[in-house]
Structure formats: C-alpha cells, structure tokens
Image: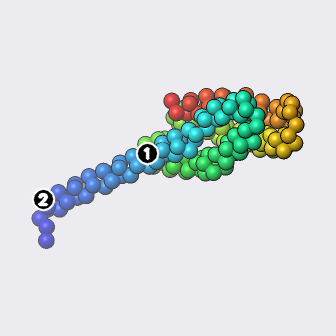
Amino acid sequence: TRSPAQSTICRILWHDARVILALTGYSVLVGFHVIFVVAMLGVTFTYPLIGPMAKAQPQHAPFALAVIEKIQRVIVFPGVALVLLTGLWAISAGPWKGDEAWLTVSIVLFFIIVALSVFVTYPAVKVAKAEAEKKAASGEPGPPSEAFIKATTKTRRLGPIMSLMMLTIVF
C-alpha cells in the first residue's frame, strides 16, 4: 500500500502527465492543420504562374489547364476537407470560446473560398480546358473561343481575391 504522501505525489504526477499529453496532442493537431493548409492549399498560389505561361504558348494551354484541374481535384479538394476537419477539431479541443472575431472571420472567409472554388473557378477551369482541347484538336490558328476567354477571365479575376482571402485567414 502507498502512504498518503505517495498517493498525493502519484496523483500530481498523473495529472501533470495528462496535461502534458493533452498539450502535446493539441500541438500535434494544430501542426497537422497548418501542414494541410500550406501543402494542400498553398499549391493554388502556382496558378498565376501556370496561366500566363499557357497564354504565352497556346499550344500548351490544354496541358496547363489539365494540371490546374488535376491539382484542384486531387490535392485541393481533399485538402479542404482535411483543413476543415482539423480546424474544427482544433477549435473544439482548444481554448477557443467561439466568439473571437478573428476566428469567425476566418471561418466565413474559408467557406466563401470553398464555395467560389467549387461553384465558380473549378467549373470555369473545366470549360477553359475543354475549349483549349477543341482549339488544339482543330489545328486552326487564331484567337481562342469566346467561352475560353469568358472562363479564363472569371478565374483570373477571382484568383487574386481568393488569394487575398486566404492570406487574411493566415495572418
């Protein structure tokens, strides 16, 4: 049997170990959240480089747009789910009450970005890719189609706005 002093020491040590494990677990969770944000959403900051390169060499536009579409489908959309899950988990497990202005603004901006991406920019990229493929298959020189111009204009205008929203969330 333990003496009262030993029992007290054991309780204190066990409490301290649980606190350390909880803090470490929370830190790991936040670390994964940050990694998902950077790795899976940060890749979208390459789009402003890919687009002008495709415009400068129109014969490569179908490939460039296929790359952007694939990044969205395979990296960004799954990344959004992981960012959302780890973010909500971090909020519920952390010291947040939910009434912090920065947190509310970040969540609202996150959902606006996701909605714009899913319902506006991703469909526009698909249209632009299809139009670029048609143009390339026809082999005809000349300006791109009206649908291509409309789709790429949409993404070119929204891209910087969405990037600014992402940077607002980060900072």
Disc marking residue 5: 2
Whichever of callouts 1 and 2 sits on the residue coming sooner in the sequence is: 2
Residue 115 vs residue 27: left or right? right
In the rendered view, tell whether residue 76 sits above or below residue 149: below
Tell me the SS state at disc 1: helix
Comparing marks 1 and 2, which lies closer to the viewer? 1
Residue 105 vs residue 143: left or right? left
Residue 124 in percent (x, y) is at: 77, 39
User: Which residue is depicted at the point 48% across and 44% down?
Assistant: 35
Residue 134 in percent (x, y) is at: 85, 43
User: Which residue is depicted at the point 73% across and 38% down?
Assistant: 60
In this view, the residue in front, 11 or 124, is 124
Residue 37 in percent (x, y) is at: 53, 42
Q: How far, Cα to Cα, is label 1 from label 2?
A: 39 Å
- Few, some or many C-alpha atoms within 10 Å of disc 2 (few <14, some 14-19, many ≥20)? few
In this view, the residue in front, 34 or 13, is 34
User: Which residue is depicted at the point 38% across and 52% down?
Assistant: 25
Indicate the amino acid at tag 2: Ala
Residue 33 vs residue 68: left or right? left
Disc marking residue 48: none
- Identify the residue at the far bottom of this view: 1
In the rendered view, tell whether residue 1 sits above or below residue 5: below
Disc marking residue 31: 1
